[in-house]
Each structure stands twice: as C-alpha cells, then as structure tokens.
Amino acid sequence: MLGKLIKHQLRDTARIIPLSLIVVAFFIIATIISVQAGAGVPVILFAVFLLFTGFLAMYFIIGYCVIRFYKNVYGAEGYLTMTLPVAEKQIYASWTVTGIIWIAIGTVFAVISYFVGMDAIFMFSPDDAGNSEEIAMIMSSGFYIIMILGVFIGSLSILIELYFCTTIAHVKPFRKLGLGSAVLAYIALYGIQLLITMPLTFFVPLSVQYIPGTGWQYANISMVSAMTDLMNPNSFSPEHATIGIAAFFWYLVPLIVLPVLTVRMMREKINLK
Amino acid sequence: MSEMVAIKGLNQKYDKRPVLSDVNISVMPGSITGLLGPNGCGKTTLIKIIAGLIKDYTGDVKIMGLNPGVETKAVISYLPEKTYLKDWHRAKDAFDMFSDFYKDFDKAKAKELISRLQIEPNARIVSMSKGMQEKLQLALIMSRSAKLYLLDEPLGGIDPATRTMILDMILQNYTEDASLLISTHLIHDVERIFDHVVMMGFGQIIINEPLDAIRVKYGKSLEDIFREVFKC
Amino acid sequence: MQFVSALPIYLQIIQDIKQRIVSGEWQPKMRVPPVRELSVSLGVNPNTAQRALAELEREGLLRTERTSGRFITDDEELIGRVRGEMAEAYADEFLLRMSKIGFRQGETLKFLKQNNERGETK
C-alpha cells in the first residue's frame, strides 16, 4: 500500500514541481553558456538569477509538498484518503517519502546552481585567482558533501516541521484559528529550535575550524572560547574561523520526534468535519 | 445472523454541544436502511463515525464486530456529500486509484455504470457539473463489492429521471450479505427501497423500525410522519 | 407500480400479484420472476418483495419447486376462490360508497342494470 500511495502522490506533485526545476535548469544552462562565451553583463545577470532561483525552487518544492499534503489529508480529498484501508502512519510515511524524493532532486539542482553561479560571479571579481583556489580547496576537502547534506537535511526538517504544523492546526482546540495556528505553531517551533541551537552552537566544545593554509579540521573548543581566544592579544593560536557544529546533532531530534507526534495526531485527534 | 453494524450508547459532542445523544442502532446484513432527519440532526456525523472519519466519540461502535479502523475501511464503501476526487482526475484516473486500494473494485462494472449514467469519460473532475461529479462518485462506490455501503445524501444534485436509474442500480446491486445505510431528505422518491428506517432529530433516534411496521403503526407515509415530527 | 403511502408495501404487492393471477394475466404454472428481478421491476426493497412472495406461497397461490424456482399454482379452485374473495371485498366497498351518496339497496341494483345496458350499447 505504501508504494501505491507514493505512486499516486508523485503523480499528483509531478504535475507542477518539475516546472520549477526546468526554470532552474534554464538558468544553469544560460549561465554556463554565457561564461563560455565570455560575455560580461549577461553572466552576472544569469548567475544572480540562478542563485536566486536555485534556492527559491527548493522553498517552492517544500511549500508545494506541504500544501498537497494538507489538501490530500485534511481537505475534501481527505474523505477519500482517510477512508482508504491504510494506516495513518502509512499515509504520513508516503507523503514524507514523496517529499524526500523531490527535496533530493531539488538539493542536486540547488547545489549545482550554487557552484555554477558562484563560479560565474567569481570569474569577474578582482581576486578571481585566489577565489578559484578557495573553491577548489573547498571542493577537494569534501566540504561540498557537508553542503549537500546541510541543504537536504535542512529542507527535510522544514518539511517535517510544516507537516507537523498543518496537522496541529487541524486538531480540535486549534481548528478555530485555522491557518493562523499553523503559522503560530511554526513560529513557536522555530523559536524553540533557536533557543536550543544557539547555546549548542556557541557553547558546546565541538566545532570545525578553518585555518588559512591548512584547511578544515575538527576542534574540541566552543565557538565562544575560540572567539575570546582570538580577541586575546596574548594568544598563540593562528588565524582561524570557528563554527560550532553541536547544533547539527540536535537537528536529528525533531526529525524523529515530530513525525511520531504528527502520526499520533493523525490517528487520534483528526476529525474531518 | 450477527449484526453488520452494532452501535450502543453513542455520544458525540462538538464544542460542548451534543451532536449525538445515546444512539443505539443495529444494521443487519442484507438490509437497506434509510437514515432520515433534518439538516443538523447528526446523520452525517453518525455516518462519518462508522466510516472512521470522526474518532472523538464515546460509546460502542462495531462494524462486523470490529472497531472502525483499517480492516473496516476495507469493507466499507463510503460516499460522502462532497466531491473527494482530485480536480485533475479523469474517470480513468479515479478507476486506477480505486483498483489500487480496493481489492473488491470492479473496473469493468465501473465503466459500464459511467456510460449508463452518461458521464464523460475524458472530462476532468474540475470541469464537470456537480451532478456529474456525484454520479461519478456513485458509480465508483457501486462498483465495489463491499459489505457495508454508506451513502450520505446520494441523490442531492441529481435529476428525477437519473434518480430512478440510480435507485434501480442500487436494487440491482443488492446482495444478502451486504448492507446499505442511505441518508436522504428526498423521502418520497426513495422510501420504497428501504426495509428499515431510522429517523433522527437533534442527535437522537426518534424512530427505528422496519418500514412496513411504521406504515401499519402510523398509517401514513414516511414523508407525512417526517413533516409532523419536525414541524416548526 | 404506484404505491399508496399508508399501506405496507408488501400488502400492496400481494394485492397486485393476486389481481394478475385471478385475471389470468399470470397463468397457472407460469414461472414467477425471482425476488431480485421482481424487486427491481417494482422498485422496492428485495426483503419486502420476498415477504410478499412468501405470504402468497403461504396462501397457496404460489409454489416453490426447489431447484426451478417459484410458480403460480395450477389449483383452479383456489384461484376461483381468491377471485371470489376479491370480488366480495370490492363489492362491499362499492355498496358502502353508494350508500354514502344516498343510494338504497334496490336503487343500487337498478342503477347497475342501467349502467350495464348503456355499456353494451356503446
């Protein structure tokens, strides 16, 4: 049943989502062609549009999946979806898989857009030689893997959060506020996340450091101590940029907790009126 | 024979206001039961509870001895008042959907029904009139061999000639091991296909008897009884 | 078939079928349509149709042959009796109505004779 649900949802979402990807593809090709042609202004133009659409397409994909999810489960279509002989957790799982598939494709497009776009822009900056080295170093050190993971997991988190928010908006006490409760729930979630991730990022002694000349490395110091250290004129540490990564581990928590809560609400608290 | 649907002591509230009060009903296999009552009397809520769409009730609701869930949904064919198909679906897409999820769906029968009901096979739902949408959904529901058919106001937007055709279709579809529960306010046309009638008002059961027994007891048609009971 | 609201449907079906049998429209030994078919053609619930047929069987007008279905009886005497019963009921009703519009018994008879003659000359 899960496969069938996914099949139908993909068929449903495939009517619109690819359009956004076609737009991004267009700008990728346009940027590459204008870079090859050595053109001036068009390169910058296309590159900017490319960067813009690259990340907008991702938001569009997430948003469209969420809208289709809530229309399919809580709208008029819900009268069919919720009377099919499938468990609520399968309905949720299938919409999540559908989201994952599109987000994965969107991530590929977003990352390609980023590198093609940035590359095109840097071609025309004064220290272009230095920056190309930067980029080459970044790519060779595997940073792009972290970037892909970051975009993918970040987008997936937003999707899961939005599925949660639209579900909670349909639960009895919040139904009255309608769309407003979904927005409030999202803001609340975002606020809670911030309250948790900020201290984790700044104070937990788990970071990555970039030292010019050496590259990236792990460091067991916190961002705050690294920054205080830098500001101390007596320290012996080399120039570095430190980014706390403890928060990344926290991101896994909502990815597990929110689906569980969402499915439970779907099973017990959703009444289609 | 054991009951198809057994409901005891069902209560349901919406915002503290009672929607169903102490409802007790049995539906036997092979029965065509009419569920009558004015708007807002709780008929639709009752049907939705049996279909598994509304879960915040107290009391006992059993379909073939089971609580509403995945197994009961597999044997219930539910027709709501709303259109629940996707805007862009054509009849063919709806058939695909139903055959994927319901083992008892008969695609050939569905095709035959939509041609009898004069439904455009290639039109998209969004471009169909409300009446045609209703007919398509009805055709889908009737093409299943379910154990319990729940029809919520199935004849609302349909013209009298088609209504007769649909009532005939319902009778032709009849089997002794399945039950139908049909809610309607078009009592006059539909009365004679029922063998049992449940009349509701203000969330409570007012009459719950075989149709012929009602006629003997009250000496009038259901429509007249209805008018009397619910006169303003 | 048009149904009247106040009488149970199964009784109305019984009346209808009796009429067809006594009038000869449905011949003795003729096969009666199965319940499902009958219910569709009358537009009534199959259980109601079944009840009517069961009652007619109880009265002897219909017979079930286990494998071949239901048949009209070939008991001409029974049919004749039922016809007589129906005629009596109609007559009683007719006389009652006539008396309500002021006809006394002798008058009713005379009226019928005149009516009959008029009918024959038409």
Image (cartoon, helix red, strand yellow):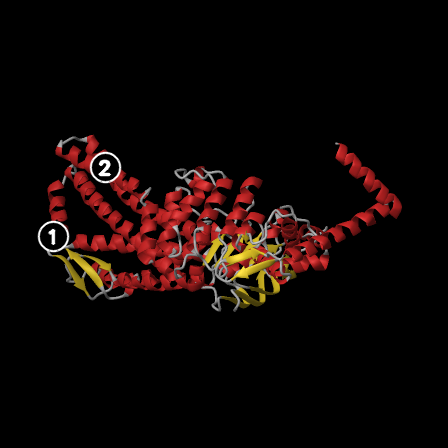
Going by the numbered disc 1, the residue's amino acid type is Ser
A187 in relation to B87, above or below: below
Q: Position of residue B107 (x, y in %)?
A: 38, 49
CA neighbours of label 1 inside 10 A, class few (<14), some (14 to 19), many (20+): few
* Left or right of C10, for residue A98: left
Q: Can residue B54 be seen here?
A: no
The label on residue A234 is none
Q: Residue shown at 29%/62% (left/top)?
A: A252
Q: Secondary structure at mark 2?
A: helix
- Identify which residue, A28 or C111, lies in the foreground: C111
User: Mark 1 to mark 2: distance in Å?
Assistant: 25 Å
The quadrant in which residue B125 appears is top left
Q: Label 1 belongs to which residue?
A: A140
- Amino acid at the residue labelled 2: Phe
- Would residue B79 be visible to someone looking at this image? yes
In the rendered structure, the answer to whether residue B202 lies left or right of residue A1 reads right
